[in-house]
Amino acid sequence: MTELSLYSRIRTHGTLAEAPIDVPDARFALPSTINWMRALAILVDDLALDFGAARHFYANVQRRAVSDREANSICEQLLFALHQIASLRAIANVPNKADVARIGIVAWYYGIYGAASAMVAAADGSFPDTHAATATQWARHFPMNRLAMAPFADRLSNLSDAAVEAELAPMRERGKHSLTVVPTTVAQAWGCCTEYLSGTAGWEKWNIREQVKGTREFKDLGTDSFRTAAAKKLRDARYDKRGIGFLHEASRYRGKANYRDSIYLAYGKSVPALLTGFVDDLERVLSAFSAMAAAYASMRMGRDPWAAFIDDLEAKRAISVSPKALWS
């Protein structure tokens, strides 16, 4: 029988979803997944990002009149985030982390999404009905207004080549480091985070180009590329309107695990060892993001409503994680 290598076959022939040229290279796909989360964990530890630090950061945020439905949404979304933290803590005890890495990433993302949704609801009383809309709304309220805490505050105002290069430049001054190499220092962690944001910008630009190619305006140009001035104008108009922030990075991260890089988390004898500590990093980063979200929500809701929510959740929770331990 001929020896089969699924990885080699996919790289050679592609899949129904991707041509060979679009199939991610294992030398980059798995390390970037692991190392971005390692970098974020290093930074939240270095910055000591917890509920107390976040309350201090949001000290000047004013309470607003939150309706019952708004308060219910804020509390519900934070409970979703808390449940995902509990899930990550539970699977951290699984011996082979390759068994749970994918579900860990999905739990992490939905925890981030729930916490971000709580922040948006606390900010303006809205609840966007898509993940993309939530990411845009969160970026508008928080990173754009300097109300997101590091390391979750980085953003690109738009995707024009000039803006991307100009805005990445000061971020690279914090440190440079390849996503293919495990970061061990704070400077290296910042370097990894900048590279992941840069990669996300490139991925978003690719999506925009594909979307533009499907428009009537592009098809009327009678071209299949962006070499002409008219085609570039259509593309660049979309670039100029598209900003990205941490929620866009998180969405890409989840999408890679769910749909694109499936083979790299489950294939290869070296993978379990490479994933040592990965679930712990996911939990640490989500806990820090949730602390930021909870602190902001507590300021907007006010002391007494927040205390009532935490007391009720502490008394009646079915999960093992204590909200008081994280958010008070």
Image (cartoon, rainbow, N blue to C red):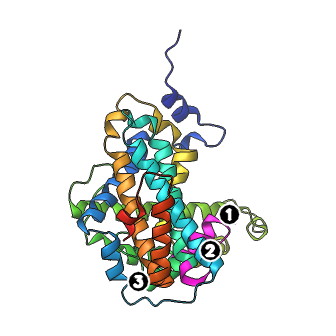
Say which element carries label 1. Answer: helix
The overriding secondary structure of the stretch rendered in magenta is helix
Nearest the camera: 3 or 52? 52
Residue ID for mark 2: 238
Looking at the picture, how far across and down is residue 315, in whole percent? 47, 61
The number of numbered badges drawn on the structure is 3
Q: CA distance from mark 3 to mark 2?
A: 25 Å
Residue shown at the point (39%, 61%) measured from the top left: 287
Sequence-earlier tag: 1 or 2: 1
Sequence-earlier tag: 3 or 2: 3
Magenta part of the protein: which range?
122-138
Viewer-nearest of labels 3 and 2? Answer: 3
Q: Is residue 142 magenta?
A: no
- For this view, does 55 lie left or right of residue 80? left
Residue shown at the point (35%, 79%) measured from the top left: 55
Residue ID for mark 1: 211
Looking at the picture, how far across and down is residue 168, in whole percent? 37, 72
Residue ID for mark 3: 146
- For this view, does 263 lie left or right of residue 175? right
Circle 1/circle 2 CB separation < 8 Å = yes
